[in-house]
Image (cartoon, rainbow, N blue to C red):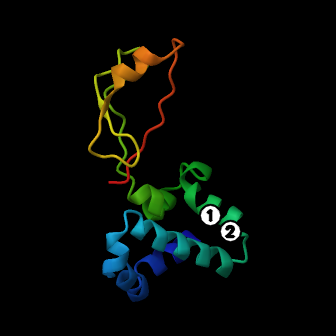
């Protein structure tokens, strides 16, 4: 499945889609193209999308010592995530957070911590840049 995903990803058809200005204008445009591609691969292999997507997206976890999986898996190949300098037990750095939908407004992280009624705060954050 990973070979087929890679083959399709490099095809002229998909490359044209990725160059489409409408796709490029969407924040998750290329991801939407990849999802359609992966769902197509699931159908080609006769798997439910749920099972097939999980297999492709978790291939590195399912086969951690397979060098071919590490090389070909889209999620592994283009993963640019790295561990940051903050470790459990460190004091939280002062950071400006942007609420969803208002990029011009910021809220200092410490302000959120001060408003908490408990000694624990779970902060879920992400980036689509």
Quarter of the figure with the N terminus: bottom right
Examine the rendered structure and indicate whether residue 9 appears above or below residue 65: below
Q: For mark 2, does the 10 Å Cα neighbourhood hold few (<14), some (14 to 19), or many (20 or more) residues?
A: some
Residue 87 visible, this orientation: no
Please identify the quarter of the rendering in which residue 106 is found: top left
Residue at 39% over, 53% down: 79
Checking the image for residue 67, the label placed there is none
Q: Residue 6 location, x and y as percent?
A: 47, 74
Mark 1: which secondary structure? Answer: helix
Image location (x, y in percent) of residue 15: 36, 81
Position of residue 11 in the picture relative to residue 44 (left or right): left
Return the x and y of residue 20 as percentages of the image width and height.
Answer: 33, 82
* Circle 1 Cα neighbour tier, 10 Å, few/some/many (<14 / 14–19 / ≥20): some
Residue ID for mark 1 = 53
Residue placed at 29% from the left, 28% from the top? Answer: 95
Residue carrying label 2: 49
Q: How far apart are marks 1 and 2 (CA)?
A: 6 Å
Look at the image and tell me in which quarter the C terminus lies: bottom left
> Is residue 37 in view?
yes
């Amino acid at each position: 499945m990973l070979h087929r995903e890679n083959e399709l990803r490099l095809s002229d058809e998909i490359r044209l889609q990725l160059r489409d200005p409408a796709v490029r204008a969407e924040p998750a445009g290329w991801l939407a193209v990849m999802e359609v591609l992966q769902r197509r691969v699931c159908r080609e292999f006769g798997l439910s999308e749920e099972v097939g997507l999980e297999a492709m997206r978790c291939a590195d976890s399912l086969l951690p010592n397979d060098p071919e999986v590490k090389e070909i898996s889209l999620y592994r190949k283009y993963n640019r995530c790295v561990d940051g300098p903050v470790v459990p037990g460190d004091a939280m750095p002062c950071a400006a957070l942007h609420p969803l939908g208002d990029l011009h407004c910021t809220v200092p992280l410490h302000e959120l911590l001060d408003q908490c009624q408990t000694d624990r705060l779970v902060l879920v954050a992400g980036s689509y840049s």
